[in-house]
Image (cartoon, rainbow, N blue to C red):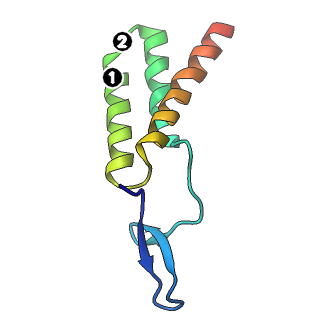
Amino acid sequence: PIPCVPWQSQTSGQYQRRVHGQALKSYSFPSGDSAQAGSFAMSMFLLTGEKTWGVVSIIIAVWGRVYFGCHYLSDCLCGTLLGLLVPRVLYTLA
């Protein structure tokens, strides 16, 4: 699946990448939403030892980004890994 649908412009006749009817100005790698979910998950785990809500937040964020066509799965996986890594490194350094 492609992360956004190409539409033909009414005025220029050129194809543009659009998400929900709005033209894209840039592409995003990695997914910031998935990175935020990963960061939340790791922070919750490090502070409380609880994994459940962190895993649920990651699943919802990744599913939503891929389902709505905003990112490829690889964007979301890399974002999640980045989000998991940063709090862990900062916690280790502190």
Q: Is residue 74 above or below residue 84?
A: below
- Which image quadrant: the N terminus? bottom left
Image-quadrant location for residue 87:
top right
Q: Which residue in the protein does label 1 denote?
A: 53
Rate crowding at label 1 as few (under 14), some (14 to 19) or many (20 or more) other CA atoms within 10 Å. Answer: few
Residue type of the residue flagged with mark 2: Glu
Residue 56 in which image quadrant = top left
Q: Where residue 19 sits in the image (x, y, percent)?
A: 42, 65
**Foreground of the two, 74 or 69:** 74
Q: Which residue is mark 2?
A: 50
The correct choice, above or below, for 24 with respect to 58 in the image is below
| Left or right placement of residue 31 versus residue 94 in this view | left
Q: Residue at x 43, y 22 (%)?
A: 41
Asked whether the beta carbons under mark 1 and mark 2 sit within 8 Å of each other, the answer is: yes
Tally the numbered discs: 2
- Asked if residue 38 lies left or right of residue 55, the reply is right
Q: Residue at x 49, y 88 (%)?
A: 13
**Residue drawn 50% across and 75% down?**
16
**Position of 10 compared to 88: left or right?**
left
